[in-house]
Amino acid sequence: MQTISITELAHVMGGADQSDFGRCGPGSSMQFLGNYYTPQCAAHDGAVRGNLANGDSQIMAHLKALPKLPAAVGSWFRARYGGG
């Protein structure tokens, strides 16, 4: 598991200028979580945004993305605490 910079992530994800995309946690409002960007968090964010683009409500978009949440949480934990 490797943490990548937002610039690298933006390049991989198509260059979108969305500074919180791929950031682990609910966004910049919770700074105590740190500033970690991982592919797993990007996959979760992409799933939520894809669901929203398909017309789902915020709640449904997040519910449909729940299967990707455990991997995102695990990647945050590994990035934050160095769990290999």
Image: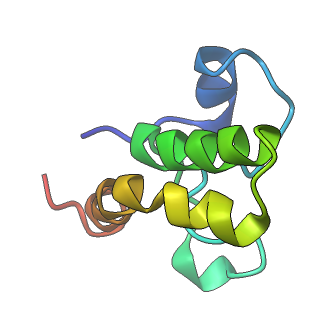
Along the line of sight, which residue is nearer the eye, 35 or 27? 27
Q: Is residue 27 above or below residue 37?
A: below
Which residue does the image show at 86% across and 32% down from the upper left?
A: 17
Q: Is residue 59 above or below residue 55?
A: below
Position of residue 4 in the picture relative to residue 53 (left or right): left
User: Residue 18: x percent and y percent?
Assistant: 83, 40
User: Residue 30: x percent and y percent?
Assistant: 68, 82
Which quarter of the figure has residue 77? bottom left
Q: Is residue 48 above or below residue 16?
A: below
Which residue does the image show at 27% across and 69% down from the upper left?
A: 81
Spot the residue most to the front. 55
Q: Is residue 38 above or below residue 78?
A: above
Quadrant in the picture for the N terminus: top left
Position of residue 15 in the picture relative to residue 40 (left or right): right
Q: How is the image coloured?
A: rainbow
Along the line of sight, which residue is nearer the eye, 5 or 41? 41
Which residue does the image show at 66% across and 16% down from the upper left?
A: 11
